[in-house]
Amino acid sequence: MITKDMIITELNNRGFMVDVKDVTKNGIKKTAFCIVNESEKHNAIPTFYIDRVIERASAMSFSLDEVIDDILETHKKSLANFNIGCMRDKEFILSHLSIGLQKESSEQMIKKKCEFEGLEEYLFVKVTFNGIDGTIKLKDAMLEIADISIDEAWNRAEKNLHDDTVIEPLANYFGSMLGTDDFPGLENYMFILTNKSKVRGASSVLDKKALKRLGESKNVSRFVYLPSSIHESILVPADGNVDLDFFKDMVKEVNRSAVNEEDRLIDNAYFLNV
């Protein structure tokens, strides 16, 4: 079995400097590494997570040489497709800013407490690597370099979040993925909130204007909020008596059976007045 030490040693043998570190991803500590090269200092250096690299190697039956070749190819493509100079550009940052939701953590970044206990809001910049949507979590130093104040960043992120919010019946959401609209009776039972890219879209539940419009259109003043994952949220109309513990158990079960650990938000459910 290929191990972390084998990967790092082989990269070193091929002449590459490797920076190995523990990082926090949605409250989960992971071991990651970057390939460090002075000539590439102006580019966004891709981060490789050891567990993912090993899982991919196992799934693809890669030899050690093939693992290293795969890492180097990904590294090269990422450097060619995103220049870190964008992160010094004030308008680029402001136009690509948004808000994410994750479990409360000690992670150092621009964040604040959330109205939902156990969760925190943070700022991130949307970027594209190799044609794939990605994100960079915002830190104080980045704002200083781009001459952006904290208030300006949060205000712009809230506007961008609103412009990007997508709300649709859960039946339609699943139907579009499965190629069918055969979900009778579910059109007004559950609603999914995300963004246009469906990447870190759970924070759409913070869009008060969109929530108010949804409530008015369905004649509903209160919902149960189910933190589905960091990418989407689910709302269930909560008129009448509602057993919140039932929904908490539902979220916990789905988290364990269907959501990757790093994509989970929290084993909880909340009432949400709109």
Image (cartoon, helix red, strand yellow):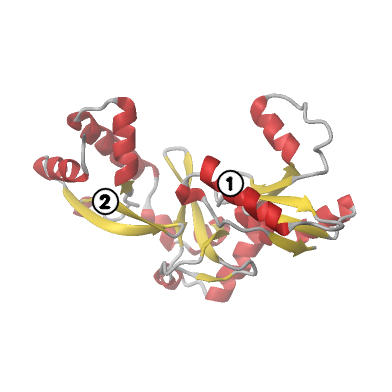
Q: Position of residue 55 (x, y in %)?
A: 33, 36
Residue in the picture at 25% in, 27% down: 62
Could you say which is closer to the camera, residue 116 or residue 267?
A: 267
Residue 173 in the figure: left or right of residue 267? right
Is residue 163 in view? Answer: no
What label sits on residue 33 in the rendered view? 2
Residue 36 lies, with reference to residue 271, above or below; the image says above
* Left or right, residue 42 beside residue 159: left
Q: Looking at the image, is mark 2 or mark 1 earlier in the sequence?
A: 2
Residue drawn 76% across the image and 50% down it? 236
Image coords of residue 117 (percent x, y)? 60, 68
- Image quarter where the N terminus lies is top left
Q: Which mark is residue 253?
A: 1
- Three-letter code, disc 2: Phe
Counting from the top left corner in percent of width and height, residue 134 is at 47, 47
Whether residue 63 is visible: yes
The quarter of the displayed image where residue 187 is located = top right
Q: Is residue 139 left or right of residue 182?
A: left
Judged from the image, the secondary structure of the residue bearing numbered disc 1 is helix
Q: Residues within 10 Å of mark 1 (few under 14, many from 20)?
A: few
Query: Label for residue 71?
Result: none
